[in-house]
Amino acid sequence: MSELRRDPILGRWVILAPERAGRPTDFSTRVEPPEEGGLCPFCPGNERHTPHEILAYRPAGGRPGDDSWSVRVFPNRYPALRVEGELDREGHGIYDKMSGIGAHEVIVETRRHGARLGELPPGEIAQLLAAWRDRMLDLRQDSRLRSILVFKNQGQAAGATLEHSHSQLIALPILPRQVMAEMAGARAYFDQKERCIFCDIVRQERKEGVRVAYENDGFVTLAPWAPRIPFETWLVPKAHASGYEEEPPSRLAGLADALGETLRRLDRALDRPAFNLMLHTGPLNERSLAHYHWHIEIMPILGRVGGFEWGSGFYINPTPPEEAAEFLRKSGAG
Amino acid sequence: MSELRRDPILGRWVILAPERAGRPTDFSTRVEPPEEGGLCPFCPGNERHTPHEILAYRPAGGRPGDDSWSVRVFPNRYPALRVEGELDREGHGIYDKMSGIGAHEVIVETRRHGARLGELPPGEIAQLLAAWRDRMLDLRQDSRLRSILVFKNQGQAAGATLEHSHSQLIALPILPRQVMAEMAGARAYFDQKERCIFCDIVRQERKEGVRVAYENDGFVTLAPWAPRIPFETWLVPKAHASGYEEEPPSRLAGLADALGETLRRLDRALDRPAFNLMLHTGPLNERSLAHYHWHIEIMPILGRVGGFEWGSGFYINPTPPEEAAEFLRKSGAG
C-alpha cells in the first residue's frame, strides 16, 4: 500500500510507492512492465497481458474485451495509487501523511505500435481526447478525489518505458503543489483585475503574434513568455473553461487538430523529440471557475535539467520563445 | 545580454540566455567549454584557459595567478548573468522582464582531476566551504542582488559537462520561486508556532532516529520525511542560522566532516552516483531570520523524472526515506 506524505515546509505531497523491496541496486521508478520477447502488452490481441479493461472505444459490432478497440484504458500494472481502501489521514509529530487512495490508469492511444501521437489521424486523436474526458467525468464522482493529472511521456528520455503510444492518468486525494500554485497565481490576478489571466495571455499573444506557433478556430499554440526549456509549448483554448472535462464533445475535433498539428511541428522542428505532455486542469470539486483556464503544456526533452533548476525552480533557457515559435510556424506542412 | 522573464501565473523567473544563435539543431544548455584534446581548463597549469581569477586560496609563497592554488574561482565562460550593466526592469503588456544582471561563477574544488568531492581530505572540503562563504560575503555588498544559489552538478547525468570537480554560484536580482516558497512555508510555520520548522525537524529526526543517516556535533544528515526521489538527502546544521554566509569559519570544519561523510556514504551505497547538490540559504538582504534555516539538499540521479513530476511538482518515489537512511547508516566506513 502506498502512502502520501507532505513536505512540512513547502506543502509538497509525494507518493511513497514501495511496490517492491527497495534494494539499493534497483531504484527503478518503472511503473509498467517491460517489453520482453517482442510482446507488446498494448498491441491489439494482447489484451490479456494488461489489467482489466476500464474503458474502450470499439466500432459497431465490437464486443467488450475483444481486440477491435481503437482506444483502451486499464489500471497501471504497478499503480502508485489504488481506488480500494479507506482514505486515512494521520499526523506524525510535525509531519502529515495519508493513505495512497486514488487511481493510476494507462490510456493506449492507438492500435498501431510505433505510431507517434502526432501521426494519428485527427479522428483518432479526438477519440483519445474523449477518453481523457470520459475517465475524468467518471472519476470525479468519487468524492475522495480532488484532482486529476493526465500526462504523457513520449520516449525513453522523457521517462517512457514502453514504446507503444500511451498516456497516463493519476487521480489524487490532494491538490499537488504545482496545481495549487497555478490556481493561487491565477486567483490573485483575477482578484486584482476581474479577468482570467489565461484569457489575457491568449489576447496579448494573438495581438503580438510573435510567440504564436499555430492557431485554429478554437485553440492557440504558443511559446510561453517565460519558457523553462527550449521549445516549451502551451496549447490554450480561446474560450474560457476551467475544467477540461467540462468541454463539450463538439470542441474536441478542434483540439485534436491543434494538438496533432502542434506535435507534428515539434516532430519536424526537433526531429521527433522525446517530450512530456501535461494537461493542466482545475480541481475536480471546483467547477466553472472564472479565474482558471485549462490548457496543455508540452516539454520537449532536448537537454538535461541540472542542479540549478532542481534546487531553485529557476531555469536557464538559451532559446527565446519568439525564436522557437517562429521555427514552429515555419515547420507547418509546406 | 541575457534577460530575466517572469511567468505571469506562477511568478517563476527564467533566464533567457541566448549566448549564441538558437539554431534548432543545437539546443545545448552548456555553460562551460568542453574538454578537448585532453586539456582540462580546471587543472593546475591551465589557468590561462579560464576567465580571470576572482578568488583563490594558495599556500604561503604562492602568487596571484600561479598554479599553486587549492581552490579557485572565476566567472563562468558562458555566463547566464553578468555583473556589468544597469538593472532595467520593464513591463511588456501583462508580462514583466528585467535585464540579466547578476553573477555566474565557477568554483574549482580541487587540484586533482578526477577526484570526487567526497574523496577530498576534510581540510580541502573545508576550503571549498570557505570559498562559497567568501564569495557570498563579497557579492552581498552589491545591493542589486537578492539571492545566491550555490550548486554542484556531479556527473553527466546531473548536467555536468566537465569532469574536474567544481561547483557553481549564481547571484540573482530576484528571489527564485522555490526560495520564495520555502521562505513562505517556513514563515507560516513560525507565525503559528514561534519556532523554526527546520529546528523542529532536527529535533524530531534526532529523537526518532530512523531517517538520520549521519550526525556529528554540529550537523545532521537525514533522509527527509517526504523525499522527491530515492536517496534525496538533506544536511542541516543543528544550530539555527538563516544565512550560510553568517556561519562562523570555525564551524566549517564540522560541516566539511558531515558533507564528506555524507557524500562518501552515497558513493558507497549507490556506486558513485551522479548527483545535484544545492545550498538553500536565506535572501541576501534579509539576515538573521528567526524562521529560516540554511541547509544543503543532495539529489542523487538514479532514474528519470517523467512528465508527471514535471507538470505537477508531485513525485512518485519507490524508496521510503527510512530505508534509504538505514542503508546510508550501514554504508559508513566499516
Image (spheres, coloured by chain):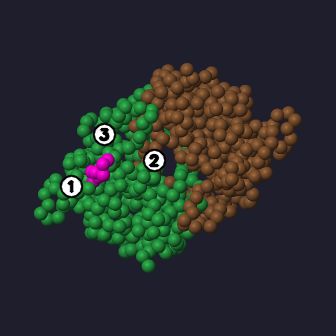
Chain colours: A green, B brown
Segment colored magenta: A36-42
Q: Are marks 3 and 2 on the same chain?
A: no
Identify the residue shown where x is 76% and y is 37%.
B70
Amino acid type at image mark 1: Gly
- Of circles 3 and 1, the one toward us is 1
Identify the residue shown where x is 37% and y is 74%.
A217
Q: Are marks 1 and 2 in contact (CB under 8 Å)?
A: no
* Quadrant the C terminus of chain B occupies: top right
| Residue at disc 2, secondary structure | loop
For residue A302, above or below residue B127? below
Q: Pinpoint the chain carrying mark 1.
A: A
Question: To which residue does mark 2 refer?
Answer: B305
| Nearer the observer, B239 or B214 | B214
| Residue at disc 3, secondary structure | loop
Q: Earlier in the sequence, mark 3 or mark 1?
A: 1
Q: Are marks 3 and 1 on the same chain?
A: yes
User: Mark 1 and mark 2: span between their CA atoms?
Assistant: 31 Å
Question: Does residue A41 show up magenta in the picture?
Answer: yes
Relative horizontal placement of residue A80, taking residue B158 as reference (left or right)? left
- Of circles 1 and 2, the one toward us is 1
| Nearer the observer, A224 or A233 | A233
Identify the residue shown where x is 46% and y is 30%.
B324
Amino acid type at image mark 2: Val
Question: Does residue A266 show up magenta in the picture?
Answer: no
Question: To which residue does mark 3 refer?
Answer: A101
For residue B207, above or below residue A8? above
Q: Are marks 3 and 2 in contact (CB under 8 Å)?
A: no
